[in-house]
Amino acid sequence: MATLNEICENMVSEVGDALGAAVVDLESGLLLSVAHNVPYFTQSYLDAVAAAAVDMFRGKTVSTVENLIASQRGTEVNRLVQEVQMSTEKTYHFMSIVPGKPNSLMVLITGRKANLGMGWAALRSALPKVAPLCP
């Protein structure tokens, strides 16, 4: 069985224009695994990107909306955000909650030359491999 690092490394090497891949613990914001091929992706940069991803999925505003929806529906609070695609001027970010692991997030970052469908396909095919390795 591959390790989290190996899975991330494979994504970076196999996806065209991939810059990095990571698995983030959404409770602590810590990187469980990361692989990249960009010299300026320092540890502090990677930590900041992980914290931003946590905010997108578990931030105060997202939690407030989830609480409001649960209240209006008369249901228990549920984590509603499952996937996010974000674009910057030069990158695409593909993010998905790991199935069965609601506090684990997988991220793939590519350049803008990447095919969006291939980015999602690579991320989604890695998720079942990642799940048994996440806490």
Image (tube, rainbow, N blue to C red):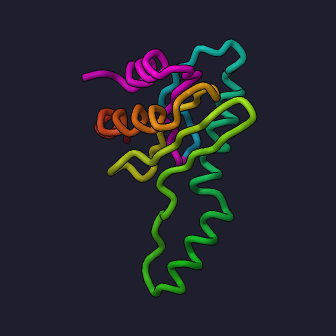
Say if the magenta span includes residue 112. no
Q: Residue furthest left?
A: 1
Q: In the image, which residues are magenta?
A: 1-27
Q: Nearer the viewer, residue 17 or 67?
A: 17
Residue found 45% across the figure and 44% down from its top: 104
Say if the magenta span includes residue 15. yes
Relative vertical location of residue 76 with respect to residue 27 in this rendering, above or below: below
Relative vertical location of residue 65 with respect to residue 27 in this rendering, above or below: below
Image quadrant assignment for residue 121: top left
Residue found 71% across the figure and 27% down from its top: 44
Residue found 59% across the figure and 14% down from its top: 37
Q: Nearer the viewer, residue 40 or 12?
A: 12
**42 relative position to 85: left or right:** right
Residue found 47% across the figure and 22% down from its top: 15
| Quadrant including the N terminus | top left
User: How many circles with numbers are drawn on the protein?
Assistant: 0
**39 relative position to 4: left or right:** right
Q: Position of residue 71 (x, y in %)?
A: 53, 84
| Quadrant including the C terminus | top left
Relative vertical location of residue 45 with respect to residue 85 in this rendering, above or below: above
Q: Position of residue 14 (x, y in %)?
A: 43, 18
Q: Position of residue 129 (x, y in %)?
A: 30, 33
